[in-house]
Image (cartoon, rainbow, N blue to C red):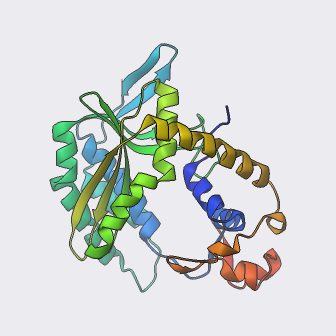
Amino acid sequence: MVKPLAPTLVEDWLRCPSYGLLNMNWEPLGTWAPHKLVGKAFSLALQQALNPIERLTLTHTPTGAVIARLAPNTASPEAILEQSITDGWQDQDDWPLDTLISLAQKGLKAAIKDTIKTILDTEVVLATELDVGEPGTEPGQWSNARLDLLTERGSDLIVTDHKSALKLDTQWIPKRLIEAEADWQLLTYAWQVQERFKRPVTRLRRHLVVSSPKAKAYLHEYRLDQDFLQAWHRGAEKEWLYISSLKDLPLQELPMRVSSCYGKFGKCAFYEACHVANRDEAKMGVLYQRRVR
């Protein structure tokens, strides 16, 4: 059986192998935006909100899955959110730190009041930030996978992925929710949970937290058809093999999927790296910088 690859990396490489490698190692100059930072801060804060007494994680033993109780984190979700944003914030004019924290706190407050309460009232939290990939790997590595939330509701086993948006107009919310029903990341997590714990995942869910213009949180859940998951996995194995055959090649030898140069959000962030600098790293330094790990 082919080992799954990290779903976030796979999505980039399926979009375009050149983009996948560039996005792993480079970023455009002078384009700091808070969205990834806030997304991670939300994940940490929601993790604490979902386990207000103690944090639970699933571990695997030869006889099956067991729940291990770890020491409680006494910081509040609000404090965790603020500290995480403060630690990662970069000094610039577009996103003042106080404004960014205030905006994010509005979304967190809405989630705790509504969606988090619903989950805690109706489900058993089995794990948050659960590693389901290769043991010992870190985010950004090919074999790493970490899902946000695993819960039980009656006989249902539910995998949830948190998403956040500092600003999202109402007209786009249904689209962001329905996309969960064709989400490579969620399907990968479902497959890995089933393989690891020998129990079928029955439902997949997106938890979307919006901070503005109206602070509100949403849950979109759907039943996972096992026949569909098996069919997806047969194709996914071919994609993993294809990407594995490319991922160690130098940038100049990777395919350029030009159909992805323009997408739903406009021009690719690495358009100039390919079309102007010809993927020559010596020339790319004018517009791009190496990512700091």
User: Which residue is rendered at x = 25% and y = 50% of the image?
Assistant: 76
Please, is residue 166 above or below residue 141 in the view?
Answer: below
Q: Quadrant of the N terminus?
A: top right
Residue 53, percent from left and from top: 23, 36
Q: Residue furthest top?
A: 63
The part of the image, by quadrant, that contains residue 51 is top left
Horizontal placement of 83 versus 195: left or right?
left
The part of the image, by quadrant, that contains residue 13 is bottom right
Please, is residue 208 above or below residue 130 in the view?
Answer: below
Residue 159, percent from left and from top: 38, 41
Q: Is residue 168 visible?
A: no
Viewer-side residue, 223 vs 211: 223
Q: Is residue 156 visible?
A: yes
User: Which residue is rendered at x = 58% and y = 44% of the image?
Assistant: 144
Horizontal placement of 89 versus 111: left or right?
right
Horizontal placement of 137 versus 284: left or right?
left
User: Which residue is rendered at x = 22% and y = 43% of the image?
Assistant: 119
